[in-house]
Amino acid sequence: DEPTGDQPKEGTTAEDSGSTEDKHLRYAWPGPDERAEKMVTTKPGQEVELDELTTHRDLCLELRYFCDSYLDYNIQAYDSAGKSLWNATYSMTQIDNKDGVPCVVHCRDIAGNPTPTTPAVRTLHIDLDGLDSDVFAMMITSQIYSGVRPTAVTVCLREAHDGGA
């Protein structure tokens, strides 16, 4: 499939193609043998609307890092008045909705680097359709208690086609 509109041609980025997209968003368009998806790369602290990334309702958040200490991430949910509803983290690994159905679950935790070339991996599944109707916004934050700075970190939000939370 040929890209249309402001989509860059195969093997290029939005910046290469002269796209009007913000220069800090990087769109990668795979070749014809790969699944046609775009990848968005953001600046630290940048807000992104979920619909800019995906319309899929079951998501998997992956945190991969290299660090000599444990790195954690939290997902906080807020209502429309800004009141905190819940915080999913290492000490609260599952959030159930009002019907008792899991909607946010920390699933996989390899907290230490298995080898010097293999990152630690932490994953969290989010079922957006399972969230209670009062959840207006969610925020992802990270924390490290030791003060040791990670040498590399990536956060990836993927579509979970094999089920959500």
Image (cartoon, helix red, strand yellow):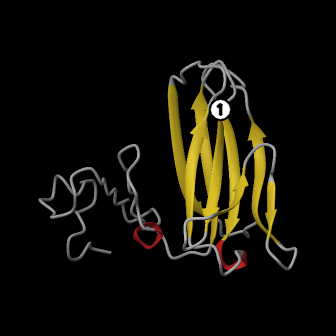
Q: Is residue 44 left or right of residue 24?
A: right
The image quadrant where one finds the N terminus is bottom left
Q: Given the current orientation, which residue lies at the most extreme left position?
A: 18
Classify 10 Å Cα crowding around label 1: few (below 14), some (14-19), many (20 and above): many
Give percent across and percent down for residue 15: 18, 53
Q: Quadrant of residue 12?
A: bottom left
Residue 72 lies, with reference to residue 104, above or below; the image says: above
The image quadrant where one finds the C terminus is bottom right
Q: Which residue is mark 1?
A: 71
Between 37 and 149, the one nearer to me in the picture: 149
Q: Is residue 16 left or right of residue 7?
A: left
Residue at the image point whose x is 64% and y is 73% from the top: 128
Give percent across and percent down for residue 144: 63, 29
How many dots with numbers? 1
Between 3 and 61, the one nearer to me in the picture: 61
Q: Quadrant of residue 127?
A: bottom right
Q: Quadrant of residue 145?
A: top right
Give percent across and percent down for residue 4: 23, 76
Residue 4 lies, with reference to residue 25, above or below; the image says: below
Between 86 and 74, the one nearer to me in the picture: 86
Residue 97 lies, with reference to residue 74, above or below; the image says: below
Q: Given the current orientation, which residue lies at the most extreme right position?
A: 100
Q: Secondary structure at mark 1?
A: loop
Give percent across and percent down for residue 156: 53, 51
Residue 55 lies, with reference to residue 145, above or below; the image says: below
Residue at the image point whose x is 43% and y is 63% from the top: 33
Type of the residue with mark 1? Leu
Residue at the image point whose x is 26% and y is 72% from the top: 3
